[in-house]
Amino acid sequence: MPRADDPAFRLFAADPAGPGDDAPPGTPGTGEDVCPDCQGHGRIGGRECATCRGTGIVNKGVGGA
């Protein structure tokens, strides 16, 4: 999660779950994973990855029943 002084903070504050997230960060039963689209780099072809919003990390469900 970006710091409050980071320009991206407004984006996360408005919608904490990114396009590639299964749920918002901190949701029980989820954890951070490397973005499958940018392989954790945060950029694809010189542009910000839309899946992870440039963080290189997505929040995915873990476990299962």
Image (cartoon, grey):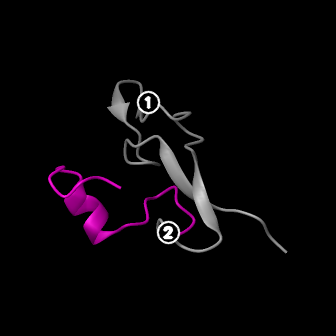
Residue 26 tag number:
2
Disc 1 from disc 2: Cα separation: 26 Å
Tell me if residue 31 comes above or below residue 57 in the rendering: below
Is 19 inside the magenta-drawn segment? yes
Tell me if residue 19 comes above or below residue 47 in the rendering: below
Specify whether 62 is left or right of 31.
Answer: right
Residue at left 41%, top 46%?
50
Residue at left 20%, top 61%?
10
Residue at left 26%, top 60%?
11
Q: Amino acid at mark 1?
A: Ile
Residue 44 tag number:
1
Number of other residues with Cα within 10 Å of mark 1, as a class: few under 14, some 14 to 19, many 20 or more: few
Tell me if residue 20 comes above or below residue 29 in the rendering: above
Label 1 vs 2, first from the N-terminus: 2
The foreground one among 37 and 16 is: 16
The quarter of the picture where the C terminus appears is bottom right
Q: Main secondary structure of the magenta part?
A: loop
Residue 5 drawn at (x, y percent): 14, 53
Specify whether 51 is left or right of 31.
Answer: left
Range drawn in magenta: 1-23
